[in-house]
């Protein structure tokens, strides 16, 4: 991994891109070995349940982000504090896996209206098809043993095993694309959990996290494990795993004093920035910096991991000022790792309500989507919303209803 990465640093053009791809292919191999140590020869699939329906919350990230991402977490372990949330009183992520009589796989996103029918499962082992809207669902089918991994032969006739076919319908209700709330990974987690349950397999949250981690490597998007555990496990929690290719992700519920929770619910605001989070190659940039042992990235990630443990202590102690300081410190560390984390448009939003703001953080990898604001004492959510609408009329920049699950 490091040999290819160092070589890419001194190369240029297409050669540089190919060497970088090889470096991250090594990361994928490590994740795959950790997820399936015995190889990806799955047992014969079967439809043990006619239908499985799941709903999951989204997540708001607080401290420790990027330390859950391979290869950093594989070599150092990771620690993240986040919270599961309902939006507008609903669990937005929904999945329905059901058996159908016809020998075909039907993939559907009910939120976008995309639907596809596949009568040959080998079509679903290919990520290279242009303008294909279903790579996430394909990857979920692969890591659940229903479709062969790219380049591998099918061992079974899936339709004979199921005595029919499968309809997988999924989507996210009323959440803008690029929200920064972990929607893609949580959607993947819901699909994996649902497809395993469809086969009668009762998997732990840690096992689902590992399979989602691998699915994202197969898709080429990368990503860590905090989002999927953020949706699978409720409440405010410390999510962590020790070093090792096999990530044993565990979630520890943080029991904050009732007065702290009452104050946090009153002062916490989730604000939509009015635009989508920008699709960028930030994950590769940050992890490449770490792989190449850049001191800035190595030290910032170390401090980020420690910050999650400090935030845990402050939450459990009911120290609101300490928690807000942790949130603001996380914002600064993330800016160090990604100079484009908060662009001028987002800074304008923060400046417009600076007098009301005690703590601030951008959801997800930054660049758009939702932002978080913890109000100064004496200000209300309605006052913040009025200020935003006055400062940015007609742009959809406003406070959204958000409840901790």
Image: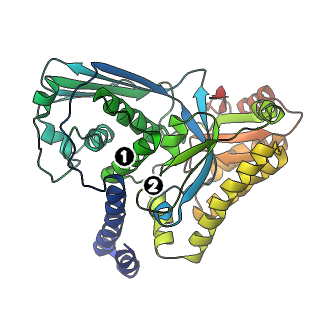
Q: How many marks?
A: 2
For the point 17% across and 26% down, the residue is 162
Pick whichever, 1 or 146, lies toward us.
146
Q: In 3D space, how far apart are the residues under numbered discs 2 and 1 (Cα atoms)?
A: 10 Å
Mark 2, mark 1: which one is toward the viewer?
Answer: 2
Please state the horizontal and vertical placement of residue 95, each as a whole percent of the image. Answer: 38, 26
Residue 69 position in % (x across, y down): 48, 57
Q: Is residue 37 above or below residue 323?
A: below
Name above or below for residue 365 compared with residue 263.
Answer: below
Work out whether residue 314 can be spotted: yes
Q: How is the image coloured?
A: rainbow
Q: For the residue labelled by badge 2, is the local secondary structure a helix, a strand or a loop?
A: loop
Q: Classify residue 166 by image quadrant.
A: top left
- Other residues around mark 1 within 10 Å, as few (<14) / some (14–19) / many (≥20): many
Q: Quadrant of the N terminus?
A: bottom left
Residue 114 appears in the rendering? no
Residue drawn 78% across and 49% down?
314
Q: Are marks 2 and 1 in contact (CB under 8 Å)?
A: no
Q: Nearer the viewer, residue 207 or 290?
A: 207
Q: Is residue 32 left or right of residue 247?
A: left
Label ID, residue 247: 2
Q: Earlier in the sequence, mark 2 or mark 1?
A: 1
* Circle 1: element type: helix
The residue that disc 1 covers is 211
Question: Which quadrant would the C terminus be assigned to in this image?
Answer: top right
Q: Please give the label number shown on residue 135.
A: none
Q: Residue 389, image x and y in percent? A: 71, 30
Crowd class of label 2 (few under 14; some 14 to 19; many from 20; radius 10 Å): many
Answer with left or right where residue 72 lies relative to residue 194: right
Place of residue 116 in the rendered image (x, y in percent of width and height, measured from the top left): 22, 29
The residue positioned 80% from the left and 31% from the top of the image is 258
């Amino acid at each position: 991994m490091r040999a290819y990465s160092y070589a890419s640093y001194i190369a240029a053009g297409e050669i540089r891109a190919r060497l970088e791809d090889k470096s991250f292919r090594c990361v994928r191999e490590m994740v795959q070995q950790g997820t399936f140590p015995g190889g990806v020869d799955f047992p014969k699939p079967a439809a043990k349940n006619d239908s499985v329906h799941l709903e999951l919350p989204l997540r708001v990230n607080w401290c420790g982000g990027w330390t859950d991402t391979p290869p950093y977490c594989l070599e150092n372990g990771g620690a993240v504090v986040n919270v599961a949330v309902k939006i507008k009183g609903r669990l937005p992520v929904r999945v329905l896996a059901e058996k159908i009589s016809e020998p075909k796989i039907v993939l559907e996103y009910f939120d976008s209206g995309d639907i596809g029918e596949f009568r040959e499962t080998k079509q679903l082992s290919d990520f290279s098809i242009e303008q294909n809207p279903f790579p996430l669902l394909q990857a979920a089918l692969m890591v659940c043993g229903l479709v062969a991994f790219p380049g591998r032969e099918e061992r079974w006739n899936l339709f004979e095993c199921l005595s029919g076919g499968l309809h997988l319908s999924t989507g996210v209700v009323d959440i803008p694309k690029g929200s920064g709330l972990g929607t893609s990974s949580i959607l993947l987690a819901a699909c994996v959990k649902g497809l395993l349950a469809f086969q009668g397999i009762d998997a732990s949250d840690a096992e689902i996290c590992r399979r989602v981690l691998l699915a994202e490597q197969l898709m080429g998007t990368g990503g860590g494990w905090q989002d999927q555990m953020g949706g699978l496990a409720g409440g405010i929690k410390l999510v962590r795993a020790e070093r090792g290719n096999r990530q044993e992700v565990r979630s520890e519920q943080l029991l904050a004093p009732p007065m702290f929770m009452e104050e946090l619910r009153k002062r916490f605001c989730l604000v939509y920035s009015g635009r989508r989070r920008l699709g960028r190659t930030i994950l590769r940039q940050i992890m490449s910096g770490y792989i190449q042992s850049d001191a800035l990235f190595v030290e910032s990630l170390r401090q980020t991991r420690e910050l999650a443990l400090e935030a845990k202590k402050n939450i459990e102690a009911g120290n609101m000022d300490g928690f807000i300081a942790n949130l603001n410190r996380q914002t600064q560390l993330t800016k160090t790792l990604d100079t484009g984390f908060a662009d001028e448009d987002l800074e304008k939003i923060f400046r417009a309500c600076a007098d009301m703001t005690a703590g601030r953080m951008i959801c997800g990898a930054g660049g758009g989507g939702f932002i978080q604001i913890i109000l100064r004492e004496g200000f209300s959510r309605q006052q913040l919303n009025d200020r935003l609408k006055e400062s940015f009329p007609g742009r959809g920049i406003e406070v959204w209803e958000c409840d901790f699950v």
